[in-house]
């Protein structure tokens, strides 16, 4: 028995000793669309094809949304006699490969979901014990992105489980982004960089601005509660290894101001931008938020530095993000329920990034380019003053003159 146990441990160590993810797949945070926030497991071949069409025709693809990801519920409730996962034939009557090919033909990339546990969160077959077999199937289906969840994992070591799957993907030979949806329970930011391209940092998001949503045994978090938990993690993020504060809830029931603030904050945090609304029915306002090229450029900035909360007094928060070529992004955000005033003196306020060692220069004047109005609104020569509506913000790109 001791020899058997030693053999099992040795095998586990062999699989987990050195994670070897595919490098260079996410030099900037991944962008795309995911089924879960709106549809949960209620997906279909028609939904995926229609969504792929709209991702192209709406301009989302041109804006950078490349990955179309099936979340939990794409498979049948049982593996087949050989242990393979089986795409649900009722949801995909022409087979999953036909859907993947359709999405690829649109110039998009295709993503899948599974779980490190014995079952997924929706009680479909998990991958535990089938890592290499499942990875081979994903490669055969030409999958480009794998989201890997953390339900039904009692007694499982997170680092071992995710490293094993990472190595299985590598062994299968098809480069694909590996998204560690571990909820931050085991601090994946401390060990995830060689394992995958992004890792979840919190519990799930919900379409509320500043509270929690109870699911009975656990609480989903709001936009601002998730933002609160990110700032100390920014030292771990960068090109090809991103903190993931979860998918976007833009277009899912919050106000226009709250949606705009949500999208802006995710850009400031260099977060993956995974839309979660029904884009077939999105309003012009939602489309304008999701495809704002100036905000997306801040998120996708090649410098790859996650922004930080510079100050927070009463309801007013100020966030900064260093950008390439000496530019900066800044958000003046009103978290409160009443209008608030801001008066920020650029020349008398030292702004220093103490983690990545960037400093906003006070001896030059930056142009204040408002990324939501598309207009230049003065320079840093004079203090910035404004009245900001509840749950809204003013967001500038500071351009060196």
Image (tube, rainbow, N blue to C red):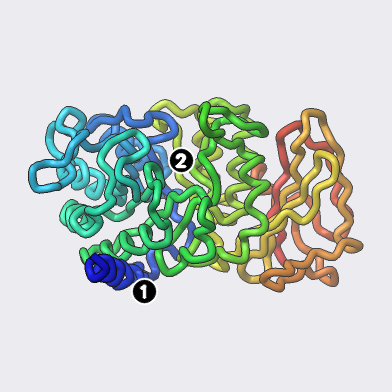
Callout 1: 10 Å neighbours few (<14), some, many (20+)?
some
Mark number, residue 275: 2
Q: Is residue 170 visible?
A: no
Looking at the picture, how far across and down is residue 351, in whole percent?
80, 64
How packed mark 2 is, by other alpha carbons closer than 10 Å (few <14, some 14-19, many 20 or more), is many
Query: Front-most of 379 and 2?
Result: 2
**69 shown above or below 349:** above
Q: Nearer the viewer, mark 2 or mark 1?
A: 1
Q: Nearer the viewer, residue 30 or 375?
A: 30
Which residue lies at the image location 87% right of the left edge and 61% below the top edge? Answer: 349
Q: Secondary structure at mark 1?
A: loop
401 relative to 182 in the view: left or right:
right
Q: Furthest residue to the left?
A: 81
User: Measured from the top left, where is residue 8 in percent x and y?
Assistant: 26, 66
Give the residue drawn at x 14%, y 39%. 95
- Up the image or down, 313 lies above or below 199; here it is above
Name the residue that disc number 1 marks. Answer: 18
Point out the image quarter for the N terminus: bottom left
């Amino acid at each position: 028995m001791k020899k058997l146990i030693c053999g099992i441990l040795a095998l586990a160590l062999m699989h987990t000793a050195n994670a070897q993810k595919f490098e260079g797949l996410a030099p900037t945070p991944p962008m795309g669309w995911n089924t879960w926030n709106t549809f949960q497991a209620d997906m279909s071949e028609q939904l995926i094809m229609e969504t792929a069409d709209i991702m192209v025709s709406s301009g989302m693809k041109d804006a950078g949304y490349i990955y179309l990801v099936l979340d939990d519920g794409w498979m049948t409730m049982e593996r087949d006699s050989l242990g393979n996962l089986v795409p649900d034939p009722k949801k995909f009557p022409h087979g999953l490969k036909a859907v993947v090919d359709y999405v690829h033909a649109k110039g998009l990339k295709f993503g899948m979901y599974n779980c490190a546990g014995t079952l997924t969160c929706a009680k479909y077959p998990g991958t535990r014990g089938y890592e290499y077999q499942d990875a081979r199937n994903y490669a055969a289906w030409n999958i480009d992105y794998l989201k890997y969840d953390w339900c039904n994992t009692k007694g499982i070591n997170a680092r071992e489980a995710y490293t094993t799957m990472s190595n299985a993907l590598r062994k299968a030979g098809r480069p694909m982004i590996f998204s560690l949806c571990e909820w931050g329970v085991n601090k994946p930011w401390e060990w995830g960089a060689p394992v995958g391209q992004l890792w979840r940092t919190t519990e799930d998001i919900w379409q509320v601005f500043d509270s929690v949503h109870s699911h009975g045994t656990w609480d989903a978090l709001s936009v601002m509660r998730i933002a609160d938990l990110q700032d100390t993690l920014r030292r771990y993020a960068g090109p090809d290894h991103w903190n993931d504060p979860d998918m976007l809830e833009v277009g899912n029931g919050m106000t226009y101001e709250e949606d705009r603030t949500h999208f802006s904050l995710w850009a400031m945090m260099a977060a993956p931008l995974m839309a979660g609304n029904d884009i077939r029915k999105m309003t012009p306002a939602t489309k304008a938020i999701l495809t704002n090229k100036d905000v997306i450029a801040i998120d996708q900035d090649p410098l790859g530095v996650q922004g930080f909360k510079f100050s927070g007094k009463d309801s007013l928060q100020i966030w900064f993000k260093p950008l390439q070529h000496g530019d900066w992004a800044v958000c003046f955000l009103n978290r409160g329920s009443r209008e608030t005033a801001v008066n920020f003196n650029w020349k008398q306020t030292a702004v220093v990034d103490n983690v990545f060692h960037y400093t906003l220069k006070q001896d030059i004047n930056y142009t204040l380019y408002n990324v939501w109005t598309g207009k230049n609104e003065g320079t840093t020569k004079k203090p910035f003053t404004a009245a900001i509506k509840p749950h809204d913000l003013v967001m500038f790109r500071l351009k060196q003159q």
